[in-house]
Amino acid sequence: MSAAPATLFTDLRAVLPGDALLIREEELRPYECDGLTAYRALPLAVALPHTVEEVVNVLRLCRARGVPVVARGAGTGLSGGALPHAEGVVLSLARFNRILEIDPLARSARVEPGVRNLAISEAARPYGLYYAPDPSSQIACTIGGNVAENSGGVHCLKYGLTVHNVLALEALTIEGERLTLGGRAADAPGYDLLALLMGSEGLLAVVVEATVRLLPLPQCARVLLAAFDSVVTAGNAVGAIIAAGVIPAGLEMMDRLAVEAAEDFVHAGYPRDAAAILLCEVDGDEQEVAAALARVQEILKHAGARELCVARDEAERQLFWKGRKAAFPAVGRLSPDYYCIDGTIPRSKLAEVLTRIAELSREHGLRVANVFHAGDGNLHPLILYDANTPGELARAEALGAAIMELCIAVGGTITGEHGVGVEKINQMCVQFTPAELEQFHAVKRAFDPAGLLNPGKAVPTLARCAEYGRIHVHRGELRFPDLERY
Amino acid sequence: MDTADQSAAIVARVREAAAAHTPLMISGSGSKNFLGRRVTGIPLAVGGHRGILHYVPEELVLSARAGTPLADIETALATRGQMLAFEPPSFGTAATLGGTIAANLSGPRRAYAGAARDFVLGCRIVNGKSEILHFGGEVMKNVAGYDLSRLMAGAFGTLGVLLEISLKVLPRPEAETTLVCERDETSAIELMNRWAGRPLPLSATAWSEGRLYVRLSGPAPAIAAAAAGLGGEHLPRAEEFWRDLREHTGAFFTDPRPLWRLALPSTAAPLALDGPGIVTWGGMQRWVKTGVPADQVRARTAAAGGHATLFRPARDASPAEDPFTPLTPALQHLHQRLKAAFDPAGILNPGRLYAGI
């Protein structure tokens, strides 16, 4: 151990109680990666403070010593955003797990950053309220992490992303200065720093408290399954629903490979011979739902759906969703490895992009299963490959890069909801110009001049862009295998 | 509709201004000149940079140049059965899209659909270094890079000259009805909050002169069922009522005293400032006409957990020195640093929002 860490530990011990500092390798090991395990690094130390004052002290100490700080929630992220820095401290907010206040009349909840996403909805349920963003990892992921990634979920077309559902944040700068961003009163004075923090991947400030908006639980929700003979017809049907003025609560699509895999895995009752299926959920009061379902059925029939089936009851509704939510692990059973893409495209390009992905799949000689949030154009093509077959990994990477670049080319983005982290940092060089990247860095410097908060993530240096490379995700290394991924 | 791409000329003006350290006063139609601090600078007219660039209804996205009249956009959307769900006020007929977003102005639907900033998907700007930068895009979900497009909403042009904006748009509701009943202010505020906690198709609420107004929007059967449950009388010519409220053309707004906009937690009790008031946005926004000194208005609003904007000075008075609620020292410092990150020479609308940024 070099002298520098030794004195760092002494300083950290001075500001943290004994149970709030980990420095031994076996204690650090659980923090070496997040949900994207292809990237691993051991930090110098992990701080597990109990109080905001302790967080302030850790930040000030690290700022004074020039030590990088990587904030961490549940570590469920899929892009390596919480990957430790080898010369840095991991700042775990796991102990900040209390719901501080629920105000049923004002429909808001004030929570600490380590509170799990689903725990908020569970606590709000007795009041007939819930927290709308529902990322697939919601049983484990924390609200602090949701803010860092601007997390979405199945229902965000209708109910918005994290940015639309957080009213206020208490955050600390690297200097340990406390900022109140947003508030229970609308449109806080000055720049919209609340929005700026959403999706900033822990590079600008550390969230120590969040006030979130709660919505009334819908009276009822029903789901409809539509089968199609071609993915292009299914893609066009998505546009037809939305053009007709219906905003479904959820609109999900799976192609044949994904349908077959899901059916083998959970027997959801999907038609195996369909080229693609759509799941369309509508919610509201009884009359509204009945009217919307009738409308959607008519649109889908007109758009060329071969088969339509409304879930008869809540049990069948859950079963339809179970197939969709099990699609990732189900596809994982088809192949030793898969590589998940997270691009978002304009909805009107859906059919065109699916056709092109099928062509690219043939050109690269690898199968692609398509599972995605069709309503908001967020694709999750899963590239199937076998890392043990020479050359397949390189082909998978080349195909992934081609799909991401296709997303950019049709006016989309490389990441809809998983974040850039370390995983997609090279593709940022394709999506943004050097001047745009430099503007991002300038914003970072405004908050964190020394570049100590989560350095090396989210925004590539121009030097890195010059050495552009490609990186991949390996299924065998996905942590939290029991969490749903969709 | 006329269209013109003046981005090259705008970039050239910003480049010259940056080189000469000459402040620019960005102006669309000038319809929001009353709002915010006065800028001393050479006018940079951007209203001619106009035209809808891309609108495909099934994408729920519209992209337009910042100088495009709001009215043109609303017409284009209406012909396809869609709308700007934040229902922006235009304060005159010439309002531009850019000014609307720069001021982050939202109308009656704000509490139920979201603010202007919630619908910003992407934008193209010229920063103070005369670089054209594009952030966000035309897609619903995008977490690549910081969300600098949303940051432009409410920045009053101090971080960049808006060139193009992409917005999420929504279908117009199939049916709409407004109910009205007699209520005092306190019970009206409580009812607004109680209603919002139930799955009702609310799209606007207001209290004014002892009457509580609630607008329901959605499929006709849902509206009918909700209206039957809420009670009250159907308001005739409801569209006019909400338009007058949104555009400040109702009788209340002719009062010569200063117009204050109080943003408060929705459940905050009435502030009882001397002067008439209107409650909107489910209790989150209160308009007050009062001659009470600014520091007292601000102190009372802050004590209730909110912030106050001197939205329009008294009739015939000069613009206010500090219309917006002052920032805490920590936030002010951060604002100055962010301003410098986008506009190091300090030439873009300097002082429009706060002195020094």
Image: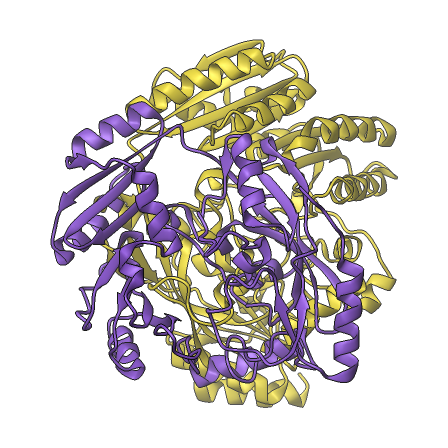
Chain colours: A yellow, B purple
Indicate the quadrant where residue A462 lies: bottom right
| Relative height, residue A316 to residue A395 (above, below) | above
Check the image and name the residue furthest to the front. B316
The front one of B355 and A185 is B355
Residue A475 position, x and y percent, is 66, 42
Residue A332 position, x and y percent, is 64, 33
Q: Work out which quarter of the rendered image holds the C terminus of chain A and state it.
A: top right
Q: Residue at x 40, y 28 (%)?
A: B174
The front one of A453 and A249 is A249
Q: Is residue B69 left or right of residue A293?
A: right
Q: Residue at x 25, y 77 (%)?
A: B291
Q: Is residue A265 left or right of residue A320?
A: right
Tally of marks:
0
| Relative height, residue B168 to residue A445 (above, below) | above
Q: Is residue B115 left or right of residue A412?
A: left
Q: Residue at x 73, y 58 (%)?
A: A425
Indicate the quadrant where residue A208 lies: bottom left
The front one of B102 and A247 is B102
Residue A354 seen in this snapshot: yes
Residue A86 seen in this snapshot: no
Q: Work out which quarter of the rendered image holds the N terminus of chain A and state it.
A: bottom right
Residue B148 position, x and y percent, is 61, 62
Residue B18 position, x and y percent, is 75, 79
